[in-house]
Image (tube, rainbow, N blue to C red):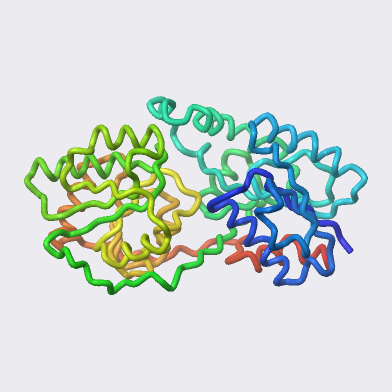
Amino acid sequence: MKTIVISGINFFEGGPLSVYKDCLDNIIKSRLNETNKIIAFVHKKEIFAEYADKVILIELPKSRKSYLYRLWYEYFYFYFYSKGKNVDVWLSLHDITPNVKAKNRYVYCHNPSPFMKTELKNLKYSYKNFLFSLFYKYLYKINIEKNIAVIVQQDWMRQEFINRYKLKNVIVARPTVIISEDINSNTPNEQKNKYQFIYPSFPRFFKNFEVICTACGILEEKGVTDYEVLLTIDGNENRYSKDLKTHFGKLQSVKFIGLQERGNLFNLYGTSDCMIFPSKLETWGLPISEYKETGKPMLVANLPYAHETVGTYNKVVFFNSNKPEDLACFMEKQIRQGNTYQNVVEKKVMHPFARDWKELLKMILIPTGE
């Protein structure tokens, strides 16, 4: 029996938590927990209650209190824990390569912020996240060469890691993307007098809501008003959304509808005509994958992450996410049904490559357990 340790002590919601649970689900599905000792370090056991009888859960609830606690656990606590434990595999799921004693180490890197150009104007929206993202490039570097492999979700991030950190083994592992059967691509839009765009996202500065709002301002100045854009914010979420509502709240075409429950969002996918996705930074970009299921047009940022997430599709237009005038042009063409779509085909990803968690576990865990 081998000892396999998995750590992700800051995960409590959203995509990162889904990654952790996908990992554990596939370990259990592959019955690796029956032939190996699986230890999972988590923020709180209650978040992982469904795994309590299948793996050993160890909670570190202070991990989210401050970055200092996080770094203490990663670089000191884990080292003393691992000494004498004869750990065969240590899989860190949260970007940082911990200082541990283990025969084989892997780190799963989600955060693409070190590879985005930083702008000082965004410091006011979240100075802690802003400064930590600057620091992240150095956190990534610590101990990274001690891993058997680094794991990322997209090929463009692999190239960034190889170029910046001179790594030789970076695995591209696709995330599990579960598309709800509730997405209805044929729900009629009862307000057909107006073409309807949607941008579903939580308001963070890199989500780039302002490029849409500025584009709408350009269109309104031209007298183009037979459309509306649904933004899933209302101005009360944080300082960024408040600023957006203050600066663009008078635009007739922009509707601040607030955050939506998943069921409501899927209904909006069905009634809307086109999605705009201008985000400058994504680990994956789940709404792109979801909206593809409708078969409807998408206007998407011309960035590496977006090209990989879109994959093969015949109703997409890529636009410069820094140029609202370009977006305004494409929006007007879309309203008039005059866009020329780019019929894109998914590019082949070179090995090492895992299409899902099952393949990834075969690469890093199963050889150790058998």
Q: What x and y, as percent, mark residue 310?
A: 40, 61
- Which quadrant holds residue 67? top right
Name the residue: 69% across, 63% down: 50
Q: In the depicted view, which residue is nearer to us: 354 or 75?
A: 75
Q: What x and y, as percent, mark residue 61?
A: 70, 41
Q: What x and y, as percent, mark residue 1?
A: 89, 64
Residue 241 horizontal side relative to residue 309, left or right: left
Relative vertical location of residue 167 with respect to residue 268 in this rendering, above or below: above
Name the residue: 76% across, 62% down: 365
Q: What x and y, as percent, mark residue 5?
A: 78, 53
Q: In the depicted view, which residue is nearer to us: 60 or 315?
A: 60
- Which quadrant holds residue 309? bottom left
- Which quadrant holds residue 81? top right
Name the residue: 83% across, 65% down: 369
Name the residue: 56% across, 31% down: 132
Q: In the depicted view, which residue is nearer to us: 194 or 27?
A: 194
Which quarter of the figure is the C terminus placed in? bottom right
Residue at the right extreme of this rendering: 84
Residue at the left extreme of this rendering: 223
Residue 72 horizontal side relative to residue 177, left or right: right
